[in-house]
């Protein structure tokens, strides 16, 4: 097998990982998109206890980290995320349906940007970390998939807790 075919196989695997964790059917169960499907704005801002995260905050957090990984691949400037801040974002308790839909759209848009970067970037930009370390963009892409699944599970738990309430 040629090195080119090996690299293409690795790229295909990375794309499959981020897609299954985000919106493609997989054996593991609900992905991130499935976890927010049919969630209302009211459900999105519900907290199990004061000071705990809600679904809307988790969605924006996931969108941000997709942006951050994409930026590491493309070299885009910091500070270009559509919302002010980083990592965790405050969400008003009176979130409207339109605002909630815009948060979910932002998540989808950031996934599309990340997927596009993974699909088209030169392999050297994906594989190598700083100084040739193994902790480069490929590792971050894999981590982004795991991050989506972790938070999909959190969202599923929050929805189950809401039903019991």
Image (cartoon, grey):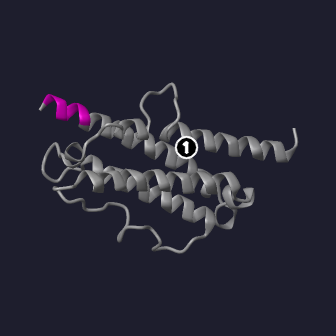
- What secondary structure is the magenta-colored segment mainly? helix
Residue in view at x 35 percent, y 50 percent: 59
Report the side of 40 relative to 152 (left or right).
left
Q: Which one is nearer the viewer's eye here, 32 or 7?
A: 32
Quadrant for the C terminus, please.
Answer: top left
In what element is the residue under mark 1? Answer: helix
Residue 64 in view: yes
Q: Whole-percent x and y of residue 106?
A: 42, 56
Q: Quick check: is 102 in the magenta stretch?
A: no
Residue in view at x 73 percent, y 56 percent: 123
Residue in view at x 18 percent, y 30 percent: 163
Q: Whole-percent x and y of residue 131?
A: 68, 67
- Eyeballing the image, is 83 above or below 136? below
Q: Whole-percent x and y of residue 75?
A: 61, 70
Tag 1 residue: 18
Report the side of 93 relative to 146 (left or right).
left
Figure label count: 1
Local packing at callout 1 (Cα closer than 10 Å; few below 14, some 14-19, many 20+) is: many
Q: In which quadrant of the rendered view does residue 29 lie? A: top left
What span is colored magenta in the figure? 159-164
Q: Residue furthest right?
A: 2
Q: In which quadrant of the rendered view does residue 125 lie? A: bottom right
Residue in view at x 45 percent, y 74 percent: 79
Report the side of 28 relative to 135 (left or right).
left
Q: In which quadrant of the rendered view does residue 134 lie? A: bottom right
Report the side of 70 relative to 164 (left or right).
right
């Amino acid at each position: 097998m040629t090195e080119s075919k090996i690299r293409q196989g690795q790229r295909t695997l990375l794309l499959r990982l981020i897609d299954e964790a985000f919106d493609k059917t997989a054996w593991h169960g609900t992905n991130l998109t499935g976890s927010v499907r049919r969630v209302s704005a009211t459900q999105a801002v519900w907290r199990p206890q004061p000071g705990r995260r809600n679904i809307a905050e988790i969605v924006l957090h996931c969108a941000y980290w997709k942006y951050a990984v994409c930026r590491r691949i493309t070299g885009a400037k910091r500070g270009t995320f559509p919302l002010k801040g980083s990592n965790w974002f405050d969400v008003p308790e009176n979130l409207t349906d339109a605002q909630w839909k815009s948060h979910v759209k932002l998540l989808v848009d950031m996934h599309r940007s990340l997927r596009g970067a993974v699909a088209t970037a030169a392999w050297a930009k994906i594989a190598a970390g700083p100084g040739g370390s193994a902790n480069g963009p490929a590792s971050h892409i894999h981590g982004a998939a795991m991050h989506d699944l972790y938070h999909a599970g959190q969202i599923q738990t929050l929805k189950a807790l809401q039903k019991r309430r």
